Amino acid sequence: MMIPDHYERQAMLEIQHWKNPRAGGSLRAFKVINKPLDSLGNAILQAPGIGGILQGVIIALTGICNDLAQLSVRPQAIFEEFRRDGWSGVASLGDIGALSLAGIDKTVGSLSAKYKGLALAEGMGAGLTGIAGLALDIPSLITLNLRAVGEYATYYGFDINKQEEKLFALQIMGLVSSPSDAAKNIAMAQLAAITRDTAKKRTWRQLEKHALVKIIQEIAKTLGIRLTKAKLAQTVPIVGAVVGGGYNVYFTTQVCDAAYYLYRERFLSMRFGPQVTAVAVRPA
């Protein structure tokens, strides 16, 4: 039986600290920022005219974002990074499972900085165009962040092209965009369930694939609606670019943090068993 080393034990503590809002983790920030934006967005979307049209366009585009994002992830480039860092035997996702968590974390480095910079530029550009820009800004933000999640997944040895992995990636996005404790807790519980199932080597039966597709579609729809509400503030003239860029960086920071901690947890769960996973939030 494998025993976690000091670095891995410390990582487990860091993960639980992040997941526990009472310990000051960043999950608390989700509700503080998302809830008032969600309420304001509700009022605007319920107004006749552009609200319904905009929402319909974004929901339709969001549905294809996950596939587009994950197709753009380049596993071979990530394997090459590992080899440059001294892990010469890494040529596939399976090889990553034999590495140390400390070594993987080192190669991951400041991945989030790249995506925060891209999100800032995209959000500021879209913010200058007002409400018309949202129809492209939100799917672009979703695609960018799903690609970030896909890269984190690949660094920690998970195949983002599998349906269950696409579901896990969207659940991360759903967690970050959750406007309430109840929604956040449901998303966290679902993420924990997938982590436990994969750690137990459970297979996703063929009969479950149709259900998986429907779940993925529903999460994509909900995500599109939540982000539409949150980003309507950037349609205000003059301040739009600042709000658009600022929200994109905030959202991308939370997504990258969530992906970092949750994929590290999954890596540890695969190595030491599903008991590593704990949902340190109150039940919804």
Image (cartoon, grey):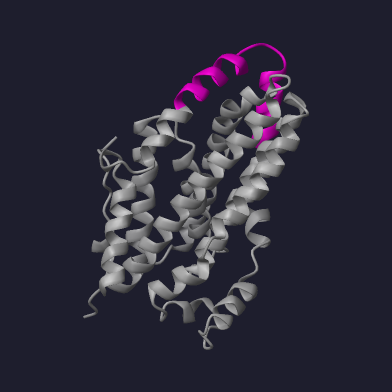
Residue shown at the point (54%, 50%) measured from the top left: 213
Residue shown at the point (31%, 56%) measured from the top left: 14
> Image quadrant for the C terminus?
top left
Q: Horizontal placement of 234 versus 10: left or right?
A: right
Instruction: Examine the residues drawn in magenta and state their main secondary structure.
Output: helix
User: What is the x, y in percent for residue 263?
Assistant: 43, 61
User: What is the x, y in percent for residue 62?
Assistant: 64, 41
Residue shown at the point (56%, 83%) measured from the top left: 83
Q: Nearer the viewer, residue 207 or 134?
A: 134
Q: Indicate whether 268 appears above or below 241.
A: below
Toward which corner of the image does residue 161 lie, by quadrant? Answer: bottom right
Q: How many marks?
A: 0
Q: Nearer the viewer, residue 207 or 141?
A: 141
Q: Horizontal placement of 108 versus 100: left or right?
A: right
Please say whether residue 230 is one of the residues in the magenta stretch: no
> Image quadrant for the N terminus?
bottom left
Toward which corner of the image does residue 69 lie, by quadrant? Answer: bottom right
- Say if residue 60 shows up in the picture: no
- Say if residue 82 shows up in the picture: yes
Q: Horizontal placement of 72 versus 1: left or right?
A: right
Please say whether residue 47 is one of the residues in the magenta stretch: yes
Toward which corner of the image does residue 235 lie, by quadrant? Answer: top right
Q: Residue furthest bottom?
A: 89
User: What is the x, y in percent for residue 110?
Assistant: 54, 60
Residue bounds of the magenta highlight:
35-61
Q: Nearer the viewer, residue 186 or 129?
A: 129
User: What is the x, y in percent for residue 17?
Assistant: 29, 50
